[in-house]
Image: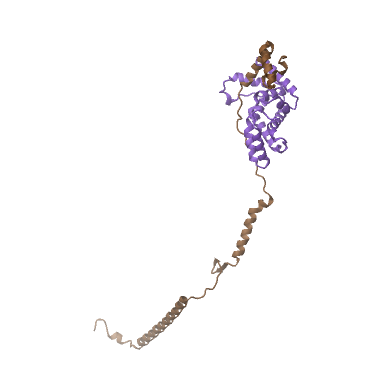
């Protein structure tokens, strides 16, 4: 085999085909000139390889912007909220009662429906009427008694009261 | 072309997710590749913070142009090509200006700081094309074919850049 000079790099880095590598090794072991070249190359290589791999001072991390959603999906939340608001407004429209009375604002939810009077209500109403009638009767009696009392008092002579002194004289 | 020690199948799955709209999955690719890409860039540029910015820029470009990647199994080669363009664009801006700084996180390594700094400095003295070949070959373990694709140069040119680079490094480092 010829000298390894032309294939020194491939020989050192073992990039020669297997058969050529074997032949080159055999030649280098026998040829002082080639061995010297290989040794010098190896010496420099060893110096270089002794320097350590460096760690990056910090890791590289990319933060990618999220892909922009389609126009439909971008507006979807807002559109949903608006639609829900409209539905609620329509649903409540007939069920909300706003009233201003005696300087007081009253907002009432739910439809007002006149309730049919129950039997108990009717009984209570009748009882109330009876009580009212009795109260009116008692008031009339009281007024009549007051009038009688005043009439009797008017008939009592004023002098009689002076004749009867507390001392009994 | 597949890069040594990489997982093109995993990359492919992640890329497919990203292309289908799972943008957060791109961070998985970043996590998988940030260290090798960062190491490549920092050795090309010589400045840790600047390298991180460029690394981020490279990944951002990759994300923007991901749908133009025809062969998903070649993601790593394509990513290195983007990192290469990002580096060379930066190097052209600051032509002749190099940075060599101490890396506090690697002080505890067995290699003495002086030796490590000497190596880093020597690397910065190489012409950019040679430096890139040395970095991609020695530190990133890429094949000559892969480096040729990244540099857009014939394999023979890549090899001769490596030889020249090594000769110069040996003359500097002794």
**Residue that sits furthest to the front in the current view:** A19
Residue B158 found in image quarter: top right
Q: In the rendering, at what x and y percent does residue B98 appear?
A: 68, 24
Q: Position of residue A13 (x, y in %)?
A: 67, 21
> Could you tell me how many numbered marks the image carries?
0
In the image, B78 versus A120, the foreground residue is B78
Figure quadrant of residue B168: top right
Q: Quadrant of the C terminus of chain B?
A: top right
Q: How is the image coloured?
A: by chain
Q: Is residue B165 visible?
A: no
The image quadrant where one finds the N terminus of chain B is: top right
Q: Position of residue B51 (x, y in %)?
A: 65, 29
Which colour represents chain B? purple
For the point 67% across and 18% down, the residue is A22
Closer to the camera in the image, B13 or A135: B13
Residue A29 appears left or right of B110: right
Tell me the quarter of the picture where residue B126 sits.
Answer: top right
Q: Which is more toward the observer, A139 or B145?
A: B145
Which hue belongs to chain A? brown
In the rendered view, tell whether residue B45 sits above or below residue A117: above
Give x and y (percent) for residue B27. Answer: 63, 37
**Is B143 in front, or is B101?**
B143
Q: What residue do we see at 64% from left, 20% from top? A: A48
| Residue A144 seen in render | yes
């Amino acid at each position: 085999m010829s000298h390894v000079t032309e294939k020194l790099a491939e020989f050192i880095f073992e990039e020669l085909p297997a058969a050529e590598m074997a032949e080159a090794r055999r030649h280098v072991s026998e040829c002082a000139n080639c061995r010297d070249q290989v040794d010098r190359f190896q010496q420099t290589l060893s110096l270089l390889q002794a320097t350590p791999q460096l760690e990056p001072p910090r890791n590289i991390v990319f933060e990618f912007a999220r892909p922009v959603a389609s126009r439909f999906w971008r507006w979807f939340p807002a559109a949903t909220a608006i639609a829900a608001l409209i539905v609620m407004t329509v649903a409540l429209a007939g069920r909300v009662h706003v009233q201003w009375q005696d300087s007081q604002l009253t907002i009432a939810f739910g439809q007002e429906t006149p309730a049919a009077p129950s039997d108990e209500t009717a009984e209570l109403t009748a009882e109330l009427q009876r009580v009212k009638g009795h109260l009116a009767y008692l008031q009339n009696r009281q007024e009549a008694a007051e009038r009688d009392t005043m009439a009797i008092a008017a008939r009592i002579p004023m002098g009689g009261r002076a004749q009867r002194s507390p001392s009994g004289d | 072309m597949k890069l040594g020690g990489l997982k093109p199948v995993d990359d492919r799955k992640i890329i497919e997710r990203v292309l289908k709209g799972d943008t957060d999955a791109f961070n998985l690719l970043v996590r998988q590749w940030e260290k090798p890409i960062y190491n490549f860039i920092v050795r090309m540029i010589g400045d840790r913070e600047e390298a991180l910015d460029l690394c981020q820029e490279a990944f951002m470009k990759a994300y923007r142009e991901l749908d133009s990647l025809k062969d998903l199994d070649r993601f790593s080669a394509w990513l290195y090509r983007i990192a290469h363009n990002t580096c060379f664009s930066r190097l052209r801006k600051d032509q002749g200006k190099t940075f060599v700084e101490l890396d506090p996180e690697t002080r505890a390594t067995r290699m003495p700081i002086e030796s490590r700094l000497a190596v880093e400095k020597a690397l910065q003295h190489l012409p950019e094309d040679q430096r890139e070949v040395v970095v991609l070959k020695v530190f990133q373990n890429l094949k000559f074919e892969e480096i040729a694709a990244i540099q857009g140069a014939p394999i023979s040119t890549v090899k001769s850049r490596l030889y020249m680079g090594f000769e110069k490094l040996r003359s500097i480092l002794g």
